[in-house]
C-alpha cells in the first residue's frame, strides 16, 4: 500500500492545502488524474469541493474527478490511477461511502498499490473505525467501521490543551476513554502540520511536531520524524 494521511488541510493563516502540497506532489509524482471523494462536505456542495481541490491540484498538473458525478462510483474507484478523500464531517463522509460501497472498493484498490491521499476525515476513514474523529455525529452511518487500511486509529488535529476558560475534557482524556474501551488498539495523536506516509511496509512521520502515542497499559509517549513506527503495524 501507498498512503499519505494528513492531519489537516490548512495551517492557520495559509491558503487551502498550501503546506502539504509539496509532499502531495512528491507522493503523486507520476499521477495525472485522481478520483476524489467529496462526501465530507456539509455546508457547501460537492461540486464546490471538487473545484476547490482541483484549483490546488492543478498546480501539480493533476486532473480531479469526483465520485459524486459518476453513475457508478465504485467503477470509478476500480479504474482510478490514485484516490483522494477530503476532510470535513467524518460521519457524513462515512455514511455516504457506506451507502455507495466505497469502503470495500477503496480497500481492494489501495491493497493493489493504488496511491491514497486523505486529510482530516479522509485520514480517519483509513483507520479500522471512525471512533477517534473529533466530529459531531450529524448523521448516522450504518456502523463506525471504516476502510481499515491501517491497524491503528488516528486522531487528526490533535491538541494538547483546551481553549482558555473551557473546563471540559482534554483531547487526551477523550482518547484515554477510547483506549480503556478498546485496549488492543493503538491511537496516534497527529498534530496539525503533520502527516503519515506508509509505503513498502514502512510507516514514516512527516512534519516538525512530534506525534503522541496512546495504548492501554502503555505509558503515553511521543515519537519524532525519523523514529521507528513499526510497532503500529
Image: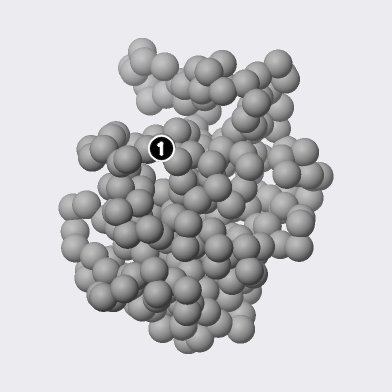
Q: Closest to the observer: 96 or 217?
A: 96
- Location of the C terminus by quadrant is top right
Q: Position of residue 206 (x, y in %)?
A: 66, 54
Q: Closest to the observer: 74 or 21?
A: 74
Tell me how many marks there are: 1
Q: Residue at x 54, y 42 (%)?
A: 128
Circle 1 Cα neighbour tier, 10 Å, few/some/many (<14 / 14–19 / ≥20): some
Question: Looking at the image, which residue sits at the far top?
Answer: 167
Q: Residue at x 46, y 46 (%)?
A: 146
User: Which residue position is annotated with label 1?
Assistant: 144
In which quadrant of the rendered view does residue 100 lie? bottom left
Horizontal side of 204 relative to 100 (left or right) equals: right
Q: How is the image coloured?
A: one colour
Judged from the image, the secondary structure of the residue bearing numbered disc 1 is: loop
Q: Position of residue 45 (x, y in %)?
A: 19, 63
Examine the rendered structure and indicate whether residue 233 appears above or below residue 218. below
Horizontal side of 130 relative to 97 (left or right) equals: right
Q: Position of residue 129 (x, y in %)?
A: 48, 39
Horizontal side of 33 relative to 92 (left or right) equals: right
Amino acid at each position: 500500500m501507498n498512503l499519505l494521511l494528513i492531519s489537516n488541510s490548512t495551517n492557520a493563516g495559509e491558503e487551502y492545502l498550501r503546506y502539504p502540497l509539496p509532499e502531495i506532489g512528491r507522493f503523486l509524482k507520476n499521477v495525472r488524474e485522481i478520483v476524489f471523494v467529496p462526501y465530507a462536505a456539509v455546508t457547501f456542495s460537492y461540486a464546490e469541493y471538487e473545484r476547490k481541490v482541483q484549483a490546488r491540484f492543478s498546480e501539480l498538473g493533476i486532473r480531479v474527478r469526483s465520485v459524486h458525478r459518476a453513475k457508478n462510483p465504485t467503477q470509478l474507484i476500480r479504474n482510478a490511477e490514485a484516490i483522494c478523500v477530503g476532510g470535513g464531517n467524518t460521519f457524513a463522509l462515512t455514511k455516504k461511502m457506506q451507502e455507495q460501497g466505497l469502503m470495500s472498493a477503496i480497500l481492494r484498490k489501495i491493497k493493489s498499490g493504488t496511491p491514497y491521499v486523505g486529510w482530516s476525515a479522509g485520514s480517519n476513514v483509513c483507520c479500522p473505525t471512525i471512533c477517534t474523529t473529533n466530529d459531531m455525529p450529524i448523521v448516522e452511518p450504518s456502523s463506525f467501521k471504516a476502510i481499515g487500511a491501517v491497524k491503528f486509529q488516528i486522531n487528526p488535529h490533535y491538541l494538547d490543551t483546551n481553549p482558555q476558560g473551557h473546563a471540559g475534557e482534554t483531547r487526551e482524556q477523550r482518547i484515554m476513554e477510547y483506549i480503556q474501551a478498546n485496549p488492543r488498539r493503538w491511537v496516534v495523536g497527529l498534530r496539525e502540520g503533520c502527516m503519515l506516509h506508509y509505503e513498502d511496509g514502512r510507516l514514516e512521520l512527516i512534519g516538525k511536531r512530534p506525534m503522541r502515542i496512546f495504548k492501554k497499559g502503555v505509558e503515553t509517549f511521543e515519537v519524532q520524524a525519523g523514529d521507528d513506527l513499526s510497532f503500529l503495524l
